[in-house]
Image (cartoon, grey):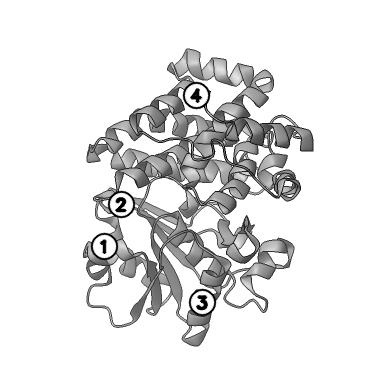
């Protein structure tokens, strides 16, 4: 098998500086009335006004910040139901895109978003087209059918997904990364790299997804640090690599790093990319015997040592492991969440409850 059994791609992708300025024009393919979901930075930068222009049929909806929650999705769903648009657009980081993706996908659903987070099989096909323009280079959400949501009341983080959640139009505009904080560039870039690595070694990978993952791994290893240092000429490379990564892991799934990162993130509220990076050494040691050929190939072909690369990034970006010395009080629930994760199920080596406990112990071990 070369390609996945079900191949899902955006209908159109535009990759060039200034692409986001054509958002309203491109979205008019679906009708004149739209809702543009965004974060606060799009307002303060003046880009929101630039995107919306003189349109009188497009209204904006601002995400309050932080990771997307089930309550936030419900609030946006209510807005979309109140005055139903022809399309929904998301311009922002992964949180903004996941929020809009889930709300547009569930606009006609009868139950709360929290219900569908636990019951993915009950999700019906989406009817509202989604346009996505990422303003960070990391999550790849613009190229996936997945929305990762947090339920703060239950301290629970898990994705919802449906094949019809794939954005119809993707706008990759490197100008959107201008002014992005260094910490955001770091966390998003680490997330993209590890997603590329996990999809590369996933037991569900195909030659098609591995080619995409390999391309992304190399491009991110060459582009993340220059972009972090302020060289905006690498913004387009990072955006494209992030999107390619999204296409890869949307079809190949991920691995135990993400199986661990979601419950860790829900409990300690650390940046997702940093969380994944802190899980990498323990997960790499756990998987090393079954992915040795992959690691050797990357090192021989591209001089890319995955563990050394991430360590070098963490060192220059002065990012510390926020989990050192921390304790997970509900350890049994934590382990159950790790084992129930679709990412863990795709890990190249089977993960047991004992393995999950040991991985957590390694990640949270106090510095020696």
Residue ranking furthest to the top: 300
Q: CA distance from mark 4 to mark 3?
A: 40 Å
Circle 1 SS class? helix
Q: Nearer the viewer, mark 3 or mark 1?
A: 3
Q: Earlier in the sequence, mark 2 or mark 4?
A: 2
- Please tell me which residue is depicted at 29% across the width and 37% down the height of the picture: 227
- Please tell me which residue is depicted at 52% across the width and 27% down the height of the picture: 367
Residue tagged 3: 75
Front residue of 188/175: it is 188
Instruction: Examine the rendered structure and indicate whether residue 20 appears above or below residue 319.
Output: below
Q: Residues within 10 Å of mark 2 (few under 14, many from 20)?
A: many
Is the N terminus in the top left, top right, bottom left or bottom right quadrant?
top right
Residue tagged 1: 21
Front residue of 120/172: it is 120
Residue tagged 4: 306
Q: Are marks 1 and 2 in contact (CB under 8 Å)?
A: yes
Residue tagged 2: 173
Q: CA distance from mark 2 to mark 4?
A: 28 Å
Q: CA distance from mark 3 to mark 2?
A: 28 Å
Circle 4 SS class? helix
Front residue of 71/192: it is 71
- Please tell me which residue is depicted at 71% across the width and 36% down the height of the picture: 356
Q: Is residue 79 left or right of residue 219?
A: right
Q: Earlier in the sequence, mark 4 or mark 3?
A: 3
Instruction: Examine the rendered structure and indicate whether residue 133 appears above or below residue 26.
Output: above
Circle 3 SS class? helix
Circle 2 SS class? loop
Q: Quadrant of residue 353?
A: top right
Q: Can residue 302 be seen? A: yes
Q: CA distance from mark 1 to mark 2?
A: 9 Å
Q: CA distance from mark 3 to mark 1?
A: 27 Å
């Amino acid at each position: 098998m070369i390609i996945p059994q079900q191949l899902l791609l955006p209908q159109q992708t535009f990759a060039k500086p200034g692409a986001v300025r054509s958002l309203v024009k491109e979205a008019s393919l679906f009708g004149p009335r739209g809702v543009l979901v965004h974060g606060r930075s799009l307002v303060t930068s003046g880009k929101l006004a630039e995107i919306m222009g003189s349109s009188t049929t497009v209204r904006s909806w601002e995400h309050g910040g932080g990771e997307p929650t089930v309550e936030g999705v419900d609030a946006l769903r209510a807005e979309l139901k109140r005055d139903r648009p022809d399309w929904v657009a998301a311009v922002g980081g992964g949180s903004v895109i996941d929020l809009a993706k889930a709300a547009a996908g569930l606009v006609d659903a009868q139950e709360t978003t929290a219900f569908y987070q636990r019951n993915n099989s009950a999700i019906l096909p989406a009817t509202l087209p989604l346009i996505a323009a990422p303003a960070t280079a990391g999550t790849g959400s613009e190229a996936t059918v997945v929305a990762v949501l947090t339920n703060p009341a239950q301290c629970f983080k898990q994705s919802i997904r449906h094949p019809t959640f794939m954005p119809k139009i993707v706008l990759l505009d490197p100008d959107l990364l201008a002014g992005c904080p260094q910490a955001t560039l770091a966390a998003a870039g680490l997330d993209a790299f590890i997603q590329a690595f996990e999809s590369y070694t996933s037991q569900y990978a195909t030659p098609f997804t591995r080619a995409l993952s390999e391309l992304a791994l190399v491009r991110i290893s060459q582009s993340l640090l220059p972009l972090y240092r302020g060289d905006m000429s690498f913004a387009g490379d990072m955006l494209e690599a992030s999107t390619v990564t999204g296409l890869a892991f949307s079809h190949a799934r991920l691995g135990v790093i993400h199986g661990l990162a979601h419950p860790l993130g829900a409990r300690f509220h650390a940046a997702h990319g940093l969380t994944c990076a802190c899980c990498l050494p323990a997960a790499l040691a756990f998987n090393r015997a079954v992915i040795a050929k992959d690691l050797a190939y990357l090192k021989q072909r591209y001089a890319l040592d995955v563990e050394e690369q991430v360590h070098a990034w963490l060192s220059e970006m002065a990012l510390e492991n926020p989990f050192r010395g921390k304790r997970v009080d509900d350890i049994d629930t934590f382990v159950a969440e790790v084992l129930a994760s679709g990412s863990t199920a795709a890990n190249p080596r089977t993960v047991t409850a004992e393995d999950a406990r040991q991985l957590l112990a390694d990640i949270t071990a106090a510095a020696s």
